[in-house]
Amino acid sequence: MNNLKTHNTIVHTGSFEDKLKSEFKKGVSLSLYFGIWFCALAFLGATTLREWPIPWRMFGFALIKAGLCAKFMLIGEAAFPLNPNRRLGIVPSLLAQSIIYLAIVLLLNFLEYGIDGVIHGRDFVSSLASFGNGDPLHIVALLIVYWLIVWPYLLFTGMSIVLGNTHTIAILFGPPKSPH
């Protein structure tokens, strides 16, 4: 692993428009990634509770939540850019950073609940307390699930930084097919 060359794909040398398009694509991709997870969890919740018919609006809420979490992750990445250490390996060096991103997502989710409460005429602090149904054990369970969702994304991003995006995609999905 010490002989890996580092290709930092986060540094943009193009125009502002190129940077904006790149960040937009990253946001959409991350929203879709989170959306798949959150819709699967919503579906699991509905089937666990034996809700029939399955309320379709829960998938809309899951997609909105996915967009918000993607935004929170992008804010976290802007504030604390990923910095995988080649000598330590991608997993050990990103483990501590994953906890930082988890804390950012947790903090921003708390703030989201507070702001949502104010928008709906409730007190900010009492709205904060309603996050995770006010149950610390439920919040811990949410954190574990959030971490399990965020961790593969961070590993993919870390690999892309160390190996380059093209090599990472080729390793995970095979080399690009050449058109005939």
Image (spheres, rainbow, N blue to C red):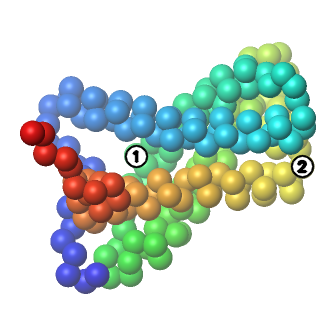
> For residue 135, which numbered disc appears in the image?
2
- Along the horizontal axis of the image, is 38 left or right of 55? left
**Quadrant assignment, res 41:** top right
Instruction: Specify the amino acid type for callout 1.
Output: Ala
Residue type pointed to by label 2: Asp
Image quarter of the C terminus: top left
Residue at 82% over, 34% down: 46
173 or 80, nearer to the observer: 173
Q: At numbered mark 1, what does the secondary structure look like: helix, strand or loop?
A: helix
Is the residue 26 above or below the residue 58 in the image? below
Q: Taking the image as drawn, is residue 65 in sight?
A: yes
Mark 1 or mark 2, which has the lower sequence index?
A: 1
x%, y% of residue 71?
50, 35
Q: Determine the residue positioned at 25% across, 83% down.
A: 2
The residue at 27%/29% (across/down) is 21
Q: Residue at x 38, y 81 (%)?
A: 88
Horizontal side of 105 relative to 120 (left or right) equals left
Image quarter (top left, top right, bottom left or bottom right) of the N terminus: bottom left
What residue did someone put label 1 on?
78
Q: Position of residue 58 (x, y in %)?
A: 73, 26
